[in-house]
Image (tube, rainbow, N blue to C red):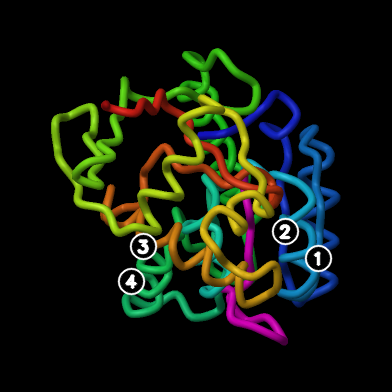
């Protein structure tokens, strides 16, 4: 989990019901959380591009895009914990929510006491997870990962060899010299030969998603999204020459 002391208290609420949103904001601000609230998917994307959040509370029924899509985006690109809100609390909707990457599904109208307990449990989990962290921006996970330039492969700390495409190898090789630092999107696009436009950014995001899936089916990898500015590899990555 990538969190700093400040991020640890940050929650973003995405809710189409202005009255319900206002109630949640006031309730959790009284509990010393730093709350950001938006009412549409587009405003959500703008918000998370500027800041990191420990937790997102998202209404599935948004006017411009399903909250399930937002959940999938967060799960793919961040370590943010996700609570989805819905009026339809059926087995099917629960399965759909969890398949989107949500950590919890809560029914509408929201019971603030229940939601408070869920959030408190999540924050305790984050605190325990962070207790071994030595960096305020990136948590070093596992041990050494090794890139093999002759075979275009990645050796994981567990000893698993992963065959890489040329683009995947080039992407990972960008992190060898920076060692847990952030590589900008602009630099990655240039190294990968992608255009510096929306198409290029989408190509980069697709590459990152495929590589994360190749490393771990549940997307738990050292490849971290760095607050919209680029990416970082949060473990030691070495070139095996």
Q: Determine whether 181 is above or below 201 in the image.
A: above
Q: Secondary structure at mark 2?
A: strand
Closest to the observer: 136 or 65?
136
Label 4 and label 2: CA atoms lie apart by 22 Å
Disc 2 to disc 1: CB gap under 8 Å? yes
Nearer-N-terminus badge (4/2)? 2
User: Residue 223: where, in percent of width, then height?
Assistant: 45, 43
Question: Which residue is found at the position 54% from the left and 74% from the top?
Answer: 69
For mark 3, give the secondary structure. Answer: helix
Q: In this figure, which residue is indicated by the disc labeled 4?
A: 95
At horizontal 70% and vertical 23% (from top left) the residue drawn is 5
For label 2, the crowd category at 10 Å Cα-Cα, with few meaning under 14, some 14 to 19 and many 20 or more, is many
Name the foreground residue: 121 vs 44: 44
Which residue in the protein does label 2 denote? 13
Residue 21: percent from left, percent from top: 79, 64
Which numbered disc, 1 or 3, marks the residue that appears first in the sequence? 1
Task: Give the magenta range.
Answer: 55-67
**Residue receiving disc 3:** 210
**Is residue 128 rendered to the left or right of residue 11?**
left
Residue 90 covered by magenta stretch: no
Nearest the viewer among 42 and 190 is: 190
């Amino acid at each position: 989990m990538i969190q700093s002391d400040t991020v640890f208290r940050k929650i973003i609420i995405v809710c189409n019901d202005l009255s319900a949103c206002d109630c949640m904001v006031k309730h959790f601000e009284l509990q010393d959380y730093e709350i950001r609230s938006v009412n549409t998917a587009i405003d959500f994307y703008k918000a998370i591009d500027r800041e990191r959040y420990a937790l997102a509370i998202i209404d599935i029924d948004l006017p411009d895009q399903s909250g399930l899509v937002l959940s999938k985006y967060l799960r793919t690109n961040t370590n943010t914990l996700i609570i989805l809100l819905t009026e339809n609390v059926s087995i099917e909707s629960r399965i759909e929510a969890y398949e989107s990457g949500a950590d919890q599904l809560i029914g509408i109208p929201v019971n603030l006491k229940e939601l408070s307990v869920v959030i408190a449990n999540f924050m305790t989990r984050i605190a325990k997870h962070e207790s071994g962290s030595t960096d305020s921006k990136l948590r070093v996970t596992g041990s050494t990962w090794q890139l093999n330039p002759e075979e275009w492969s990645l050796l994981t700390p567990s000893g698993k060899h992963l065959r890489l495409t040329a683009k995947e190898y080039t992407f990972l090789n960008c992190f060898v010299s920076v060692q847990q630092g952030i590589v900008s999107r602009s630099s990655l696009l240039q190294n990968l030969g992608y255009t510096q436009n929306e198409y290029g950014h989408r190509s980069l995001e697709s590459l990152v998603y495929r590589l994360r899936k190749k490393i771990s089916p549940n997307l738990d990898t050292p490849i971290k999204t760095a607050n919209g500015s680029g990416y970082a590899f949060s473990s030691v990555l070495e070139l095996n020459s």
